Image: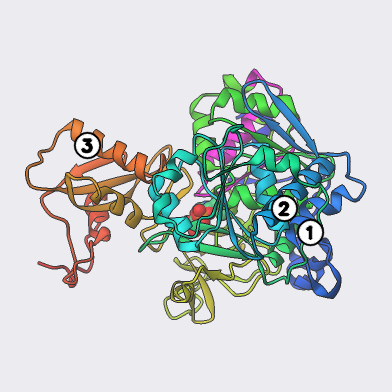
């Protein structure tokens, strides 16, 4: 660290000299705001139709296209291969209108489920927002998903339409005969569509660019995203149009978006971060966003910041660690002076990540933010005006009551570890788990929303993440359910039984590790393990496969036959075994 940086760091705290900040933070006076803020104040950040109706996409696109931001660039899409496409708010308005008309012409009805399965591209944003304008429930899917993951989502939600491209559509065809409700497959990049496919281009060219965005009840749904829990298949987390209020507020207060900012969220739209902070929130604030196609690469990421003069950057700890691992010479080759504030989300950000950033980004630390697919927007965070304690998630947003409690819902004393809970309800909170009330109710206990995380609060009110209270795996910040991986594993002919855990990893936070019992006639070999890995990758998802596989004779199970992942984890990590009274033998 340089001398200048050490001035920022006192007793491990990153202090902020507010006079030195390029722009005044949007949120100032946190302590007072915590006392005075009312959610009704935030309602004014968005536009409402008569009779209390709303549409999130109207706020995200239309209000800017119909106002002073008409000619402002909304999206800078950089394919990472030399082609940059700029789209203004007005152009996005016309394109999303067209797409809404395409859906209406196909007969897609209010609150029908429309899935978008695309690589990052202008069409991805257009179809996602166009669907919301039309009153459908839009759902983006991560492009690394394989046929099993696609089937689980489209089947559970009875999706009627899928927007995809000529490569990804092949995976959908592998399971199409299991999807009776799927009526429309819209392919964005094919001139000659096959029987049963709809050409995006042809339909868009024929569609009017006039559309009246559907007036929705604030409690009607804008989008849904499937996410993983400990047990069962992924569950559909459903978000209401009302959420745009908090998605807008947090983009201003946390991401500190100002009119002149050029903003870049590195998350894919298949994840909640991409949806809320790579699309909805920042555009609702009328800010220019960068979308970078292709894969992660230190060179191209730094180049992107330099070329597009990015000022606000929202990324993930694994990416930060990968950049750190590349060394400090590389960023020194680029002009990164446009950066103003940096953020991260998805898993714990190590203190080293925060301080490293001070070094390479001219005194700008990463601000860790905490939230979940279910919470719909950032709830606990480091604000730009606030000193940072590296390693801490920061403090709750004004309007949010967060606590550490025990299993009875009783608040624990300062410094004690327990369940991180939030007091319902906040505007962007999920409204249901799609058609699964019992699952929704599992979150709600003792008058609290249980996040599934454990944490503690220090004497200054800063929150510190401890871990997950359940078996959910965070690998490279992406959320994976052990049951999904186990289900994919046992589809392989050589696998009789499988137990899956997260194993701590320096770079990725956790990696997926599988313990497998082989079916008779199969013997352990490196080739077999590699074959099993490939199998899961191709069926389930490119990111959700076990990097490590141990072949075992048997798996620890309860008397009722449930695999005790806790024991697998304890054994793997050399932890105390704990209570084994329910163990089978
Ligand atoms: C889980 C939610 C919503 C953003 C992307 C993740 C973990 C999230 C942090 C953080 C430590 C974090 C938690 C949480 N997580 N942010 N700042 N520090 N852990 O959304 O996929 O729904 O995962 O990610 O375990 O419960 P998600």
Q: Which label was assigned to residue 529?
A: 3
Query: Please, is residue 537 above or below residue 309 in the view?
Result: below
Q: Residue at x 46, y 72 (%)?
A: 436
Q: Mark 1 points at which residue?
A: 213
Residue 112: percent from left, percent from top: 60, 63
131 shown above or below 156: above
Alpha carbons under labels 1 and 3: distance apart: 52 Å
Which of the labelled discs sits on residue 542, or is there none? none
Whether residue 72 is visible: yes
Q: Position of residue 486 (x, y in %)?
A: 29, 53
The residue that disc 2 covers is 100
Q: Nearer the viewer, residue 356 or 424?
A: 424
362 falls in the magenta region? no
234 and 546: which one is in front?
Answer: 234
Q: Give the range drawn in magenta.
A: 332-360
> Which residue is at 60% across, 33% downward?
189
Q: Is tag 3's residue or tag 2's residue first in the polypeptide sequence?
A: 2
- The image quadrant that residue 32 belongs to is bottom right
The answer to which quarter of the image holds residue 530 is: top left
Instruction: Work out whether mark 1 precedes mark 3 in sequence or the reverse, and give the earlier one.
Output: 1
- 533 w.r.t. 114: above or below: above
- Residue 137 picture quarter: bottom right
Tell me the mark number nearer the camera, choosing from 1 and 3.
1
The C terminus, quarter of image: bottom left
Task: Specify whether residue 387 is in view.
Answer: no
Position of residue 3 relative to residue 45, above or below, is: above
Q: Could you say whether the residue bearing mark 1 is in a helix, strand or loop?
A: loop
**Does 418 sit left or right of 304 as displayed?**
left
């Amino acid at each position: 660290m340089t001398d200048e940086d050490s001035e920022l760091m006192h007793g491990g705290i990153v202090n902020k000299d507010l006079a030195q900040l390029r722009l005044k933070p949007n949120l100032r006076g946190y302590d007072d705001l915590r006392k005075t803020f009312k959610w009704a104040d935030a309602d004014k950040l968005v536009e409402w139709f008569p009779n209390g109706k709303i549409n999130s996409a109207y706020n995200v696109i239309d209000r800017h296209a119909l106002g002073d931001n008409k000619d402002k660039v909304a999206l800078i899409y950089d394919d990472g291969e030399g082609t940059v496409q700029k789209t203004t708010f007005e152009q996005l308005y016309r394109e999303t209108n067209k797409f809404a008309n395409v859906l209406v012409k196909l007969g897609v009805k209010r609150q029908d489920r429309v899935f978008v399965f695309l690589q990052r591209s202008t069409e991805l944003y257009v179809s996602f927002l166009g669907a919301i304008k039309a009153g459908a429930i839009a759902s983006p899917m991560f492009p690394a998903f394989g046929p099993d993951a696609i089937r689980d989502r489209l089947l559970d939600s009875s999706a009627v339409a899928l927007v995809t491209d000529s490569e990804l559509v092949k995976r959908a065809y592998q399971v199409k005969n299991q999807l009776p409700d799927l009526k429309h497959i819209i392919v964005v990049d094919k001139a000659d569509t096959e029987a049963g496919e709809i050409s995006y281009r042809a339909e868009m060219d024929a569609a009017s660019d006039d559309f009246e965005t559907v007036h929705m009840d604030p409690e009607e749904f804008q989008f849904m995203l499937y996410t993983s829990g400990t047990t069962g298949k992924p569950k559909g987390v459903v978000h209401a149009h009302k959420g745009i209020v908090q998605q807008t507020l947090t983009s201003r207060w946390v991401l500190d978006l100002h009119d002149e900012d050029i903003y870049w969220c590195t998350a894919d739209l298949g994840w909640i971060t991409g949806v809320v902070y790579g699309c909805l929130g920042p555009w609702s604030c009328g800010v220019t966003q960068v979308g970078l196609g292709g894969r992660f690469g230190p060179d191209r990421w730094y180049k992107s910041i330099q070329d597009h003069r990015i000022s606000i950057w929202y990324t993930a700890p694994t990416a930060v660690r990968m950049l750190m691992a590349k060394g400090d010479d590389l960023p020194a080759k680029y002009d990164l002076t446009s950066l103003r504030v940096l953020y991260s989300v998805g898993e714990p950000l190590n203190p080293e990540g925060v301080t490293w950033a001070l070094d390479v980004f001219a005194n700008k630390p990463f601000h860790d933010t905490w939230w979940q697919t279910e919470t719909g927007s950032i709830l606990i965070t480091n604000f730009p005006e606030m000193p940072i304690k590296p390693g801490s998630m920061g403090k709750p947003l004004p309007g949010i009551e967060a606590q550490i409690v025990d299993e009875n819902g009783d608040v624990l004393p300062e410094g004690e570890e327990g369940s991180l809970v939030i007091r319902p309800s906040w505007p962007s909170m999920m409204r249901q788990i799609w058609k699964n009330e019992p699952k929704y109710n599992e979150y709600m206990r003792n008058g609290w929303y249980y996040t599934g995380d454990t944490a503690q609060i220090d004497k200054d009110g800063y929150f510190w993440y401890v871990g997950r209270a359940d078996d959910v795996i965070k690998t490279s910040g992406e959320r994976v359910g052990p049951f999904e991986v186990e289900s994919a594993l046992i589809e392989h002919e050589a696998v009789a039984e499988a137990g899956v855990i997260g194993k701590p990893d320096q770079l990725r936070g956790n990696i997926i590790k599988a313990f497998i019992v082989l079916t008779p006639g199969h013997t352990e070999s490196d080739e077999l393990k590699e074959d099993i890995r490939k199998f899961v990758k191709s069926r389930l998802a490119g990111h959700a496969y076990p990097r490590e596989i141990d072949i075992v004779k048997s798996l620890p199970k309860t008397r009722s036959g449930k695999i005790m992942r806790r024991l697998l984890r304890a054994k793997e990590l050399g932890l105390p075994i704990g209570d084994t009274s329910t163990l089978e033998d």
